[in-house]
Amino acid sequence: MTTAVNTASIGIERSPGLWSLAWKRLLRDKIAIVSMVIVIAFLLLALASAVGLVAGGWNNEIAKNYAPPTWFKGSTTEEDLSKSNKSAAAGPSLDTGLSRPEFVNDRDPLRDTITELKQQLGQSTSGGADEIKIVDPLADVIAELKKKLGRTGDGDANEVEAEKLSSLAFGADKWGRSVFDKVVQGSETSITVGFAAALVATLIGAFLGALAGYYGGKTDDFLNWFYSIFNSIPYILLVLAIAAVLNKKGILTVVLILGLTGWASIFRVVRAEYMKHKARDYVRAANAIGASHARRMFVHIFPNISHVILVQLSLYVVIFIKSEVILSYLGFGVGVDTVSWGSMLNEAQNELILGYWWQLGAATLFMAILVTAFSLFTDSLRDALDPKLK
Amino acid sequence: MAAYIVRRLWQIVPTMLGVILLIFFLFNVVGGDPAYLLAGKISNPETIANIRKQLGIDEPYYVQLWIFIKQVVTFDFGQSWSTNEYVSSIFATRLPASLMIGIPLLIVEAIIAILIALGVAYVRGSLTDRAVMVSCTVAQSVSILVYIIVFQYVLAYKFGWFPVQGWGNGFFENLFKYASLPILIALVVSLAPNIRLYRTFLLDEINQDYVRTARAKGLTENRVMLVHVLRNAAIPIITNLMIQLPGLLVGLFLIERFFSIPGIGREVILSVERSDFPVIKAITVYVALATMLANLAADLLYKAVDPRVELK
Amino acid sequence: MDLLTTFRTQGGLGRCGAAILCALSVLVVGCGDRSPKSAQQSASDAAVSSAVSPVQADGKKVLRIPFVVAETGFDPANVHDLYSSIVVEGIFDSLLTYDYLAEPAKVVPKITTEMPLAEDGGKVYTVKLRKGIYFSPHPVFGDKKRELVARDVTYSIMRHYDDSIKPVWRFLIEGKIVGLDDWYAANKKAGKIDWDAKIPGIEEIDSHTIRFRLTKPDVNFNYVLAHPAMSIVAREVIEKYPNDAQANPVGTSAYYLKEWVRGQKIALEKNPNFRGGTWDFKPSGKDPYDEILVKQMQGKPLAQIDRVEIYPIEEEQSRWLAFKDKQLDLINIPGNFSTQAIPGGNLAPELLAQGIRLQKMVDPEYTYTYFQWNDPIWGGSEPHKVALRRAAAMAINRDEEINVIRKGQAIKAEFIVPKGVAGHKEDFKSNIEYNPALANALLDKFGYKKDTDGYRRTPDGKPLIFRYNSTPTALEREFDELYKKNMDAIGIRFESEKEKFSDAIKREKRCQVKIRGAAWIADYPDGDNFTQLLYSRNIGESNNACYKSEAYDKLYEQSRVLPDGPERDKIYLEMQKQFEADTPWAMGVTRLRNQAIYPWVLGYKKHPVLLAEWMYMDINTGKGK
């Protein structure tokens, strides 16, 4: 019964082919197709990175610090690199010599243990054993352990340093990690953040907006009050405050900060749509046959305004991907176990002047391509769904 | 009309109360304790206790909240906790700098965005239309942080077209020398969404009956566009500008920091870092008030121009 | 390490090694490999002699310098950040100061006729003020020149006991001066401050003579009198601005506050009532550049510079470009740009060609990463906990910190007293050095077994986490990256905990922060200022690890009453041993300071302790020479 009413009601309000018509219009739009392909490519890239097909080793230090892109024969020569890498040695020659023998710390409870371990590891010791021994609380334990662990030299002690590359496709960052891997991994993070935060904001905003618009009256007054509070507080203060409350690092925190502070704009739009729709005939009809409020709100009205929500959602994705950069600048970006475009841009802040422009360039390029494609796609989507603005 | 205005103004009270509660909760209850910053390098418990007492943060929350409300009502937020500067003087000295960037930005942006929007609306659907829209989109897809870093280095330092950073005392010195690059950067990132929006406003008008009538009367397309369409589209455009203004007070913090401009945005970041609650409170309350008044003004403007708009 | 934004000083040390001197300046002759650069050098020599400040302000000499963070205010008793202290020192006089060139730093009279006369084994100090020390003009003084007298000294010290101004430097004198604490207690009881009281321990013998009586002998009292917090203010001015002495500093030193746009610009101009004096310092003999300074300045009246403009510029890029754009006369080269400015330790040719001079020095400071002594897993003196801290300390790769994060501009700190501070042991090398293999073996031995996820657990099977507390800054993010890598290498899980600075300090004082990076810079160049960091009675104040060791405490108490010398050095070595045995901290680095200075700035040398050297400097404006 309800299904019948449902389809019928949509049929009354909108032509049955709203979505298919929009889709057809979208396909006629060349820009829309190109941007859709780019967005899908990025999504696939993010997915591949998520399942570990690409860029899984972004955290490996495979190249020399700030190794330039392979194709870039700029001013940064290998000599420069090695020079800058060695600047420590050249500058503070005040550093104490490494070959100096250890002194005997008669206060150290671990002295014997460490001497013994060093012998096992094949590391040189300065023969502290002959020195005067003071009361050592660990003496017995150590003697016992000595018997048990009578072997010498652990295998992993002297691992050979792998040869570091002097150039990479997109260059390397200050630790010698591949910028390309980082930017791919960053795509995954930033896209995840963008979509997840957009979803959070949309869920909150659309749900509250639906309640306010549908029920009106006291509910509307209350939610509108709540909305205007969020809308009135300067955005940056809200972000800083919520970031301080959620003082744990991670993607989830970033998503929550963005989602919790960003829901206000969709609230207004959805509220207005629900106010418009609740007075329409098909909703009255649903009411007449006894559909519940929840049913009317979400089964009947929702499909009719879902295109508005979709456009808002995709606007959010773009906004949040860009906001993540600012969050990173403020120090509330993702943690060090992940990398995002925002964290890369902030890391690369000073690298441009130093001539190491590739990390800044790569992150900017990737972000610009996706954000442009997504924005254009959103525009086309809006036009396709609402053709009178064409 | 008057009744409406009174009612809307009256509505500011509960909203402001909500703003006060939220900010109080976020910064006073779960936020940082400034006493530890103000105590300097070596601080013993007595020093901390004394600072807390002097600042009044050892009082129960309801007392502190009441003080906050009194401050909002009297518009007297006292002195900054970290610098002892009167909050009113913070506004007097920081606001001009923020406005010096914000207002020219809004004006220039409006002029350019309207001109481009008119142009593309005129040739809507053409290749030019699409090309302009795509290039604007590309321009805004680069993070403002990148623009700042690159423009400061290349345009200001390498080419020497602008000062690298700084702020002067003279009005024209600031406007033409120090504010130009910051305005340019803000322009690049904000132009695209506004062109898009104004184009929509213009197209909305173009589809109206009166435009068709005007055309039918034999008016030239130029005249139709410039006189009829633009005049009517001006309302939503002006409204949009008004609503944007309060956000500009604190929204330019990145630019203000990089170019060492003594604006409100830079002050916000600094005061949050220092847990300088009087300053945070004052900036929040003033910006919230400005936002609400701007929204009211925008609604009134709509009403004044288009009587069909229902004021509720 | 986030202390650096709040408390980092401009200090630095002049006791440079020979290699540093080589790098020090283009003007240093006979220093090894100068042949490839000789052409550039002669070019820049020419640039130096003719270089003239770009600021031409009616013949006034203007010095423009940056601040890294915004200042807060200039009341000597409650100035709580380093940058404001710099301004305080430029405006106010303390009784004593430091010799501009002497190495090691030496306390000398500033507004006294001679060094205080110490009697009774350091319990009584008699100070004679110079005549003719005048405050800068201010309406409260009327048309008269207001002279600084003994009562001003007493009043300025008493102010540290005025709770209403939130004093933060009271610890420097607390419990030291006879009768001062009693006077405070009496005021508290009475509910008001008796400003006219006589303090038994601060006897005003006549208008220009003061006798301090201390509760016990104090060999460091001269350092206290030289501290900018002990600057002398005029009571009339302070009482004129009951709530805002911070914005109305009126002192007797060479400069007064002319214009202040907070967080934007601080402009100081020469105090017309300044007492004057002649530039007369002897080269230290340890730094060839001293000779040049002396040549530039000897015999000139003090305070050649008419105006000092200070600009707080938070962003490194902006600050560095502003310097290169000649908007600033000198700069402490931001760490991130040092690879470009001083590749391989020498000034880049591009900067050299402009005659820019590089001054390198070591700050009297160190950084350290502490482990919470009260933590059930990381703290305490049981062997397996010592082993855990030791292993973590041995896993931290300070070479990489220095090369990658600090861009080579730091050296490893080894001793509990840093370089350049009395009591430092030259060429000492700690036994705790980077050795991940040993760290792993140590952990294995003490039962920190790896779980299935590859991370170790405590011997009793609890999760083991290196929870590193820091502020959300770009620099700290680099430390997160480094420490995560280092801890991963020994199978300890890394977690970062981001907090606002004030929140972290609050928990730190309560011994609740597990692991955090901190830094300490000398308030005065004596080892005591550092060894007290581990003294258990300073828990809740400066002992942020909450380290408690009876053995260390005993040694510290012995060392405290001794002046600098071999006897104290011996105790310091024992303290170092105890410190290493317990490993309450992983020792960090001592940072190098690289000042880049345009050639028109004359007579400038960053002093290791002094904050504001302006009155000893000059600017070449190309006129009147």
Image (spheres, coloured by chain):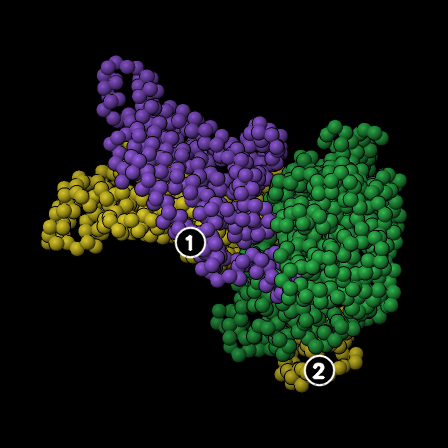
Chain colours: A yellow, B purple, C green
- The residue drawn where x is 66% and y is 38% is C259
Q: Residues within 10 Å of mark 1 (few under 14, many from 20)?
A: some
Split into 4 quadrants, where in the image is the N terminus of chain A?
Answer: bottom left
Q: Amino acid at mark 1?
A: Leu
Q: Which residue is mark 2?
A: A136
x%, y% of residue A76? Answer: 64, 41
- Residue C192 position in % (x across, y down): 64, 60
In the rendered view, does B124 fall on the left or right side of C374? left
Q: Is residue A157 visible?
A: no
The residue drawn where x is 85% and y is 49% is: C130
Does dot 1 land on a helix, a strand or a loop?
helix
Q: Position of residue C295 (x, y in %)?
A: 88, 40
Question: Crowding at label 2, few (<14), some or many (≥20) Cα neighbours within 10 Å?
Answer: some
For the residues bearing labels 1 and 2, Cβ distance under 8 angstroms: no
Give the letter of the chain under mark 2: A
Which of the 4 image quadrants contains residue C136? top right
Vertical placement of residue C190 versus A110, above or below? above
Q: Which mark is residue B1?
A: none
User: Dividing the image into 4 quarters, which one contains the C terminus of chain A?
Assistant: top left
Residue B22: numbered disc: 1
Q: Nearer the viewer, residue C433 or C364?
A: C364
Any part of residue A58 in sight: yes
